Image: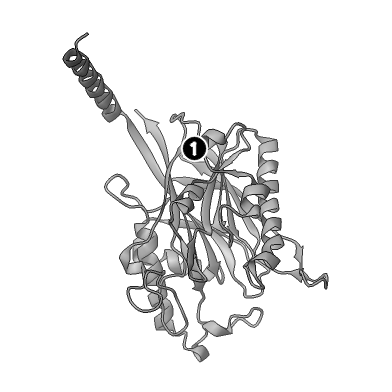
Amino acid sequence: MKIKQLIAVFVVIFAINSVIAQDKKYKVHTVAFYNLENLFDTKDDPNVFDEEYTPAQGWTSDKYQQKLKNLERVLSEIAVNEKQANSPTIIGVCEIENRGVLEDLIKTPKLLAKDYGIVHYDSPDARGIDVGFLYQKKHFTPTSSANIPLIITNFDGSGKRVYTRDQLLVTGYLDGEEMHFIVNHWPSRSGGEKRSSPYREAAGALNRKIMDSLLKINPNAKIITMGDLNDGSYNKSVKKEIGAKLKKTELKEPGDIFNPFEQMAKDGNASLFYRDSGDIFDQIMVSQQFVLEDFSTYQYWKAGIYNKPYMIQQTGQYKGYPLRNSPSEPGFSDHFPVYIYLVKEYK
């Protein structure tokens, strides 16, 4: 066959494939995670260390309301584009003081219109900060939830328990399809990364235990784990304890976990800046059942970090960093939110 004829054949084949692809329609849902950085109300709770965020320290009702407006803008806009007009269907959050602040948040006008529900438990964290789960009621129906404690002891040898955030497990149906979500906020690097690493390794082991318990009930369980891990995708807590994989092609068994944010970190992206270097501590990982590319069910499509200019410090020493929050100045967060798309073909 002559070269011109061969090219003509390829052009026809490409055109046919393009038409077929255009005929396919997909439902898209966004799953997001956002560290809300000290979303505290103005009340002094005597049971936790929240004094920094009280009127006595300059944290007023006006500043609290501005903080809510800032978060409302971000959460309503995450991953919204020409192909996806809806704000996230599922949102995992951390660094919230209590259920009340989440109720205030979802009552802001842009989020109220989306009719979000809340799953929340109080955690034993010394500062009183918790994780939480928001969902659009018209798309997701929770059937069960549990807060699973992370039991760890102080690395100083005292044997005293370190009170940190629970891991939140929510099971439910996304448009009729059962899924499990785990929301995390792992122990910080206080005391140094190396010294505090066993805490996060224990958190990773607990995460893996939760997933394995779900897989024991249903080997084909669809699981998404997300959160501020205070570790990168390359750390032992994620790579060894969870066993997260860099590439989708590495997933061979239903219990295998894909971490799209590992490649993003390798490419130089960041969800926060820690000691003057960028990293991705905020991650969303999916089980093997989300990467089968059988689009008759919801499948992982792609991931992103939401970092619009209005969320970024534009001047000074911290130029390029997230525009963070403080008692004197209500900002956004010291983290950028992360998200993934789930897609499903429909006729």
> Which quadrant of the figure contains the C terminus?
top left
Q: Is residue 4 above or below residue 128?
A: above
Q: How many marks?
A: 1
Name the residue: 44% across, 29% down: 296
Residue 311: give x, y in percent of width and height: 36, 68
Please name the colour scheme applied to the rendered image. Answer: one colour
> In the orientation shown, which residue stands out farthest toward the front?
3
Residue 304: give x, y in percent of width and height: 41, 51
Q: Is residue 276 above or below residue 224?
A: below
Which of the 4 image quadrants contains residue 341?
top left
Residue at the spot of label 1: 176
Q: Front-most of 205 and 94?
A: 205
> In the orientation shown, which residue stands out farthest toward the bottom?
56
Q: Is residue 136 above or below residue 299?
A: below
Q: Front-most of 324 and 221?
A: 324
Q: Front-most of 26 and 228?
A: 228
Horizontal side, residue 117 vs residue 12: left or right:
right
Residue 183: give x, y in percent of width and height: 57, 55
> Which quadrant of the figure contains the N terminus?
top left
Please, what is the three-letter code of the amino acid marked with disc 1? Gly
Name the residue: 53% across, 46% down: 259
Can I make out residue 31 in this image?
no
Name the residue: 46% across, 80% down: 326
Q: Front-most of 219 and 6?
A: 6
Disc 1 secondary structure class? loop
Can I make out residue 263 in this image?
yes
> In the orientation shown, which residue stands out farthest toward the left?
4
Residue 69: give x, y in percent of width and height: 37, 71
Structural crowding at the residue carrying mark 1, measured as other residues with C-alpha within 10 Å and reported as few (<14), some (14–19) or many (≥20): few
Name the residue: 51% across, 37% down: 248
